[in-house]
Image: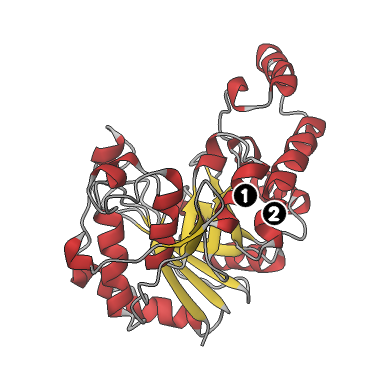
Amino acid sequence: MGEIRVGTCSWTDKALVSSGWYPPGRRDAEGRLRHYASRFPVAEVDSTYYGLPSTRNSHLWAERTPAGFRFDVKAFSLFTGHPTRPEALPADLRPAVVRQRRERTGTDPGLLDEVWARYAAALAPLREAGRLGALVFQFPHRLAPGRAAVEFLRRCRERAAGWPMAVEFRHPDWWREEHVDATTALLTELDTAAVAVDMTQTLPTSVPPVVRVTSPDLALVRFHGRNSAWGTGSKEERFRHAYPPAELAEWVPRVREMADRAREVHVLFNNCCGDASVRAAESMRRLLGLPEPSGAELFAEDRHGADRELYSRPHSTW
């Protein structure tokens, strides 16, 4: 059976930081990540969707996490076909985006290649340290099944050749009965992990909770919460949901099935409202029968270069 890793889609979310989940002395950037990594073995990075990552951050993330920790990194919005603000790009590349908007031309493949080269180079330290789980391409709702969409997916895979890749579709038709086999075959051909989704099933845009393992290396599940305000309102309104054990239990046999077919399964909670995501992750870990974290904190260097040991405290004292 493959290894199952449970975590959340952000360790820096403002609502989580203000919830009190992080103990005193662990609320700066370094302390948050070290504390999170002492509780969970995987996390998602969403900042790389809004702007290019930095080499410095990749080094820091690797230094502040133990060997074997995994980061699933979201693909930049320009790669997935989402609207991208010129300000999200390095200054020397912004004129090209402004010009394309003005002339209403498609994104220049040369620009995409250059942005991809910088994106990949910035993540190289994370990959070299063995911390990279997958690049998660979350496609917009307008990417519906069809020839043009398939070709777009193939170009994405060609650009990310050699990198571990996962795909989450926001258009539900990819996983409807009439398309599910073709979608599975396509992602298998592209050696790309299919992201299974848990969300409310009451909306026309609801993505079915279909599980398909399309890569022998990795399978992913992302839990978005089951709030009917999905797609509307504020972020808190969209993601406000506390998963009760009964809802999580529905996924236990599915996750185990995925682990029978993939070397790693990442189960990530995106119900980022207060501490709901970390609490749901802790519940899912127990339901899956996974071992509790040892509680041993990492060693770190203080500003003067002297080693200090960061002792963890019992959960009840946080």
Q: Which residue is mark 2?
A: 125
Point 71% across, 26% down: residue: 106
Q: Are marks 2 and 1 in contact (CB under 8 Å)?
A: yes
Tell which circle, 2 or 1, labels the residue nearer the N-terminal end: 1
User: Circle 1 sits in a helix, a strand or a loop, which is it?
Assistant: helix
User: Circle 2 sits in a helix, a strand or a loop, which is it?
Assistant: helix
Q: Amino acid at mark 1?
A: Ser
Q: Which residue is mark 1?
A: 58
Say left or right for 189 vs 194.
Answer: right
Point 28% across, 78% down: residue: 286
Comparing 122 with 173, the one in front is 122
Comparing 11 with 314, the one in front is 314
Point 48% across, 42% down: residue: 141
- Vertical relation: 293 (above or below) 238: below
Say left or right for 145 vs 12.
Answer: right
Q: Tell me the distance, in whole angstroms, between the alpha carbons under discs 2 and 1.
A: 6 Å
Q: Picture coordinates of residue 52 (x, y %)?
A: 63, 37
Residue farthest to the bottom, as pictured: 1
Q: Picture coordinates of residue 229 (x, y %)?
A: 25, 41
